[in-house]
Amino acid sequence: MDANEIRQRFLDFQVKKGHKVIAPAPLVLEGDPTTLFTGSGMQPLLPYLLGKEHPEGTRLTDSQPSMRLQDIEDVGDPRHTTVFEMLGNWSLGDYFKKEQIRNFFEFLTKEVGLDPSKIYVTCFIGNGKYGIPKDLEAAKIWQEVFAEAGIDAKIAEIGSAKVGDERGIKEGERIFFYDDKENWWSRGGGIETTPLGDPCGPDSEVFYDFGEDKQDVEKYGKAHPASDGARFMEIGNQVFMQYRRKEDGSFEELEKKNVDFGGGLERIAAAAIGSHDVFKISLMKPIIDKLEEISGKSYETNTDEMRVIADHIRGAYLLSAQGLAPANKTQGYALRRLIRRAILRALDLGISTNFLSEIIPIVADNYRDLPDSILTHRDTALEVLLKEEKAFRTTLNKGLKELNKMAKNSGKLSGADLFKLQDTYGFPFELSVEECYRSDIDLTENYVKEFEEALKEQRERSQTASKGMFKGGLEDHGEQTVKYHTACHLLLAALQKHVKEDICQKGSNITADRVRFDFNLDHKMTAEEIKKVEDQVNEWITADLPVIFDEYDKAYARDVLKAHGEFWDKYPEKLKVYTIGDFESPISREVCGGPHVEHTGALGHFKIKKEESSSAGVRRVKAVLD
């Protein structure tokens, strides 16, 4: 069964259960400053989940193409993609847990044909502080459906994912209780940060087991559904919106309860073929096969490169087929970056000539079943992408030649060199950095600062969506981006407290999806250091500390307030200082132009996703807020 068939079977199945098929939203959003693209199946339905009546009724279903560029650096492993399709169904005050759980299990086992013994599920363990009970209702329903399939599903009381990494799974366990970091949904993240008046509630996630041999225990710990590693893959999440947060901070049951279900089409298709590698499903493998043919190289020995190319070209086609054109700002720049990254990886495979004309028709055929209402520019997509490929080839050849010449002459590249490559040769800053990483070309310690100074001198500061050239390094001033900006201050303070006192910022890129933070450090952070930093940031978030600012004379801010700042000689005589925590003994005090949240409790749960080298003596952390 291929992915297109699974999509259609899902929609047909939901229609049989009384749902109306609604048109998916476009990937490119208009009028939403918080995100560049539709990032989930529920995103377009949020107003109706918050109480607005939907014209199609109370039972809805669709298949929503989605894009999350925060995963772009992770593409290359078996499951991360920038673009994916979310199968969704919703009950707006209609059916609830029993019907949802039974229907999804029926779809997976009867329609898709998954082995019930390979399905594992999670439920919410409850929260005594807020009087929210353990979701025994959902667990009991799961036990019933498993029993009907001949499986005795035992319950495991795990709590946190970290405990699970140490504990693993005991024989017969199939239903796992986790805390609100794993099994609670609200717009604010965890229970503590649930916005007042918002519907919220527990969720029940469904995982597929690809086998014990897939788990790297040394790297990820013992396997359990919420663990990292390749054994378990989440294939669906059922959110049960049954509570509302009251003005006093407590929770009450909703009279009208909602169900929000989202299932990853690519992941369900991977489970259907028994492979933990989503790049082997029908939406991906034909692209990989063509890349093998063009390059004369195998997927097994060039896995990362082919995964990145397949993912990025797929995303580029879906964006251009919806009418988006490459540009130097916002969504158009994201499209341009996908194309350019794919072409750079093709060079690694020895593909030095234009090749999109051989790949795009395959991608277009893979998505022939998506409705014309969303792919409104199928006929012109190929032309748009080929034009961009041709233009970038010219830029690429000149830029790479000059980059290597500069590196040969000086041994390392400065920010001024990178600016020259962009300004003179049209070779983008971030692609220069990526090429330096790939080719082991050293960068100066302050290359980001040097690059930005060169931009300022030339009065050519470009406000692009990918490199964070907005004020304060922010992609935009949307709500989620502002949260990440505040989290960035907490991260620096935690690094200084638990890793090294003299750590300072060497660069940052803050978007609505994540924070990327560069800092001086002469060693790779240990797992213990990463955990201490994570735990400290989350402790400060849970403490719901005030975030305040005021303007001060530069000398007073530096000498009396002891505010943290990197460029005192360049600051104006009057500057803004942000303080987090008690004013007399703050946990963070930085010179910053803002904006920030008013209290740390608004941030959600902080998690470091990756720690890596940025350049000599500089480390890079990528982190998200759940």
Image (cartoon, rainbow, N blue to C red):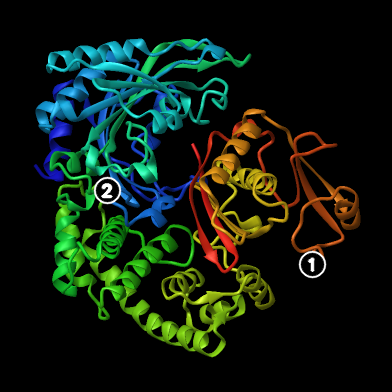
Residues at badges 1 and 2 in contact (C-beta under 8 Å)?
no
* Disc 1 versus disc 2: nearer the observer: 1
Of label 1 and label 2, which has the lower sequence position? 2
Counting from the top left corner in percent of width and height, residue 467 is at: 53, 62
Q: Amino acid at mark 1?
A: Lys
- Asked where in the image residue 235 lies, by quadrant, the reply is top left
Name the residue carrying label 2: 374
Which residue is depicted at the point 30% across and 76% down?
Answer: 347
The residue that appears at 62% across and 70% down in the rendered structure is 445
Query: Is label 2 in a helix, a strand or a loop?
Result: loop
Task: Report which residue position mark 1 lands on.
Answer: 570
Question: Which quadrant of the figure contains the N terminus?
Answer: top left
Q: Residue 352, percent across and down?
A: 27, 80
> For the residue carrying disc 1, how many other residues have a C-alpha within 10 Å: few (<14), some (14-19), or many (20+)?
few
Checking the image for residue 521, the label placed there is none
Please, is residue 331 above or below residue 147 in the view? below
146 with respect to 569 (left or right):
left
For badge 2, the amino acid type reads Ile
What's the distance in space between the residues labelled 1 and 2, CA to CA?
49 Å
Where 588 falls versus 128 (above or below)? below
